[in-house]
Image: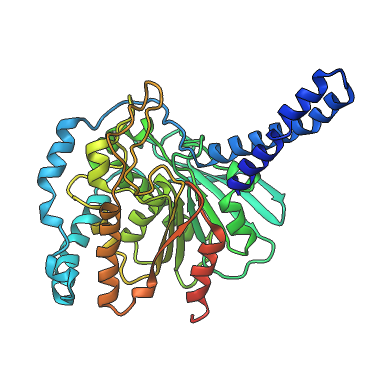
């Protein structure tokens, strides 16, 4: 669509100089003709700016930098024990299952060890009708020794007037949203992708997400993605135990965008009761991030010590259906072009991601799915957009499998 507006801008600009020349000869009526041309040019320029703003990843807010260069070097040196076996990538199911048993236990034990994140009570802060949805703001309360004590916690439960399936969708936003550690009501009020999922007939749970300073000690010790997983997972358990959500089959769908997508697949790897996963804007390679990506004053909150590739986490999900969405205009799209400097907070990168980096991660995971004869259960959907969630493609992927349930 942005190409149309560039063409419109060009076409509106073409008559400007001839009109100026005619108007210079005191034919004043020709000056009036300039007005619609300039109006069209302004409109096209605003639309182009809005488009590029939508695909731009906003800068992270400053907070304590807890993951330094030495820590990253340690992670690079110590992760070999959890490498997917070479034999598994070429068809040895036995090698894969033996590895999975060991790594699954390490991974679950690491998340289970994160303490003090289980809610102790809840309150309904608000309930309202909005465009065919009932939006319920649910506040979780945590004990005094929890890092989330007296902090906003819980989430937004969106219930459509006409629900089509008794499987709730978890919608995890990432750094693309401005309200970190706050109730994400704007996801629905501004009719963003979680709103569209709910309007399609799914009950949606959008948890308070992207805590940073509140969980800094835990984030440094366990890794921010795993702490976010623990917070969301404990919230899911609480919703079921208190019968706030009724899921007889105990199945969920998880969806996420940006760092919310990384959290989403890390959550799906942890919980066996998540049936489908849709992850957008999560085409980041761990080694690339460790070597290239720094934001001044901000923790490296993509870091998971003890692994050397996100593909190891993704592989734990096999063979459940999951889709990764990536846009050609996403700044992280693997075309090798460097990310540009953004003021003092982001120095840019020396290069962009190579297709063999993230492509290698995805192909490794796809080979695991192929081993289970479920190659079509793993999807990488490439679109022409930016850092965004494509609801239409997500629903098509989910419905393809729901039809057989």
Query: Which residue lies at the image location 58% right of the left edge and 46% below the top edge?
Result: 3
Query: Which residue lies at the image location 15% right of the left edge and 66% below the top edge?
Result: 99
Image coordinates for residue 225, horizontal then vertical, percent: 32, 45
The residue lying furthest to the front in this view is 25
Q: Taking 45 as reference, is 306 left or right?
A: left
Report if residue 242 is visible in the image. Answer: no
Image coordinates for residue 17, horizontal then vertical, percent: 71, 27
Relative depth, front residue between 214 and 283: 283
Question: In the rendered image of this protein, does residue 295 appear above or below residue 402?
Answer: above
Query: Quadrant of residue 377 in the image?
Result: bottom left
Relative depth, front residue between 145 and 117: 117
Query: Which residue lies at the image location 64% right of the left edge and 59% below the top edge?
Result: 199
Question: In the rendered image of this protein, does residue 57 appear above or below residue 378?
Answer: above
Report if residue 43 is visible in the image. Answer: yes
Query: Which residue lies at the image location 71% right of the left edge and 37% below the top edge?
Result: 12
Image coordinates for residue 301, horizontal then vertical, percent: 32, 38
Image coordinates for residue 171, horizontal then vertical, percent: 49, 53
Query: Quadrant of residue 6 in the image?
Result: top right
How many numbered discs, if any?
Answer: 0
């Amino acid at each position: 669509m942005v190409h149309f507006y560039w063409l419109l801008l060009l076409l509106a600009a073409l008559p400007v100089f001839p009109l100026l020349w005619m108007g210079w000869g005191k034919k004043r009526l020709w000056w009036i003709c300039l007005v619609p041309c300039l109006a069209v040019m302004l409109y096209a320029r605003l639309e182009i700016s809005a488009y590029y703003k939508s695909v731009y990843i906003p800068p992270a807010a400053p907070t304590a930098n807890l993951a330094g260069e030495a820590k990253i070097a340690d992670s690079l040196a110590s992760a070999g024990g959890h490498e997917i076996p070479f034999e598994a990538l070429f068809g040895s199911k036995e090698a894969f299952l033996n590895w999975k048993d060991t790594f699954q236990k390490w991974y679950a034990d690491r998340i289970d060890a994160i303490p003090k994140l289980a809610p102790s009570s809840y309150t309904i802060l608000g309930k309202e009708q909005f465009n065919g949805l009932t939006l319920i703001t649910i506040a979780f309360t945590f004990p005094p020794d929890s890092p989330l004590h007296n902090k906003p916690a819980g989430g937004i439960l969106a219930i459509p007037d006409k629900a089509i399936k008794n499987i709730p969708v978890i919608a995890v936003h990432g750094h693309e949203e401005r309200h970190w550690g706050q109730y994400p009501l704007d996801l629905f009020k501004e009719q963003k992708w979680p709103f569209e999922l709910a309007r399609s007939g799914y009950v949606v749970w959008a948890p308070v997400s992207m805590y940073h300073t509140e969980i800094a000690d835990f984030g440094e010790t366990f890794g921010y993605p795993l702490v976010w997983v623990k917070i969301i997972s404990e919230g899911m358990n609480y919703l079921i135990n208190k019968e706030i959500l009724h899921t007889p089959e105990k199945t969920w769908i998880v969806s996420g965008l940006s760092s919310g997508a990384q959290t989403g697949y890390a959550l799906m790897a942890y919980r066996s009761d998540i049936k489908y996963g849709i992850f957008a804007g999560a085409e980041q390679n761990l080694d690339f991030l460790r070597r290239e990506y720094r934001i001044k004053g901000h923790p490296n909150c993509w870091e998971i010590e003890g692994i050397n590739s996100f593909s190891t986490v993704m592989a734990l999900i096999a063979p459940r259906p999951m889709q990764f969405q990536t846009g050609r205009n996403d700044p992280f799209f693997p075309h090798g072009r460097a990310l540009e400097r953004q003021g003092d907070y982001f120095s840019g990168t020396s290069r962009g991601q190579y297709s063999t980096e993230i492509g290698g991660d995805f192909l490794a995971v796809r080979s695991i799915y192929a081993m289970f004869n479920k190659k079509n259960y793993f999807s990488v959907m490439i679109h022409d957009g930016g850092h965004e969630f494509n609801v239409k493609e997500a629903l098509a992927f989910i419905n393809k499998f729901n039809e057989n349930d």
